[in-house]
Image (spheres, grey):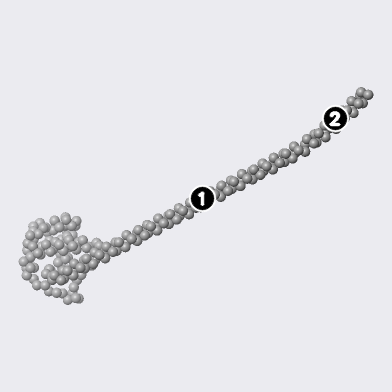
Amino acid sequence: MDDGDENNSGNNNNNHKKSIPLQPQQQQLFVMDSYNIHRLIISGITVASKFFSDVFYKNSRYAKVGGLPLEELNNLEVQFLLLLDFNLMIQVEEMYRYGDLLLKFWKREQIKRQAQQQSQQEAQQETHQQAHEQAQQQAHEQAQHTQQEVQEQQQEQINIQQQQQQQQQQQQQQQHHDPQGQQTYNSDEQQEQDSNNSFTHP
């Protein structure tokens, strides 16, 4: 722990301790997740540096580099030592085994992250595809509506032209019948005038 001075006491005693393997039922394991893996590494490096060398940085330096509050790192150091039961001497095979566990955990987290990214990309692609299909459907409906309006306008123009043609035909028919009636009326009037003239001038 960081008490303001470099705390080197106890290193020599720890170096002379023998590794006492724990029974399977007595072993304690870290519950690793993406939130405490960083703290586990920082606390392990802090304890290991004090265990392997008499010259080491203060906890304040490790806390600053690791981005942790000093009080939290001090507590993590104590928890780390209690978890190991202050048995810091481990075999090389055991160290590699824990290293493999950390590597497997990291790979598993990478696979999970890639799967999440892939699922997000698939969801985005599906959303884009749905939006594209919806836009195509709206464009098709708009085109059909526009085509229907054009057809209605064309039909309306045809109806207007037909009505105009019918009106023209009716007018032509009326004009064709009226001159005959006017000519007949004029002939009768002319005959009446002739008869009057013959009566007046013998």
Nearer to the camera, 187 or 43: 187
**Relative depth, front residue between 45 and 13:** 45
**Which residue corresponds to the image point at 21% horizontal and 68% vertical from the top-left?**
101
The amino acid at mark 1 is Ala
Place of residue 75 in the rendered image (x, y in percent of width and height, measured from the top left): 17, 62
Residue at image location 85% in from the left, 29% down from the top: 190
Q: Residue at x 16, y 55 (%)?
A: 64
Instruction: Residue type at mark 2: give it.
Output: Gln
User: Which label was assigned to residue 190?
Assistant: 2
Left or right relative to 59: residue 156: right
The crowding category of the residue bearing disc 1, from other C-alpha atoms within 10 Å (few below 14, some 14 to 19, many at least 20), is: few
Instruction: Mark yes or no: residue 121 visible.
Output: yes
Determine which quarter of the picture holds residue 95: bottom left
Residue at the outermost right position: 202
Q: Which circle marks residue 143 in the picture?
A: 1
Is mark 2 in CB contact (under 8 Å) with mark 1?
no
Give the alpha-carbon distance from disc 2 to disc 1, as whole Å. 70 Å
Vertical placement of residue 183 versus 14, above or below: above
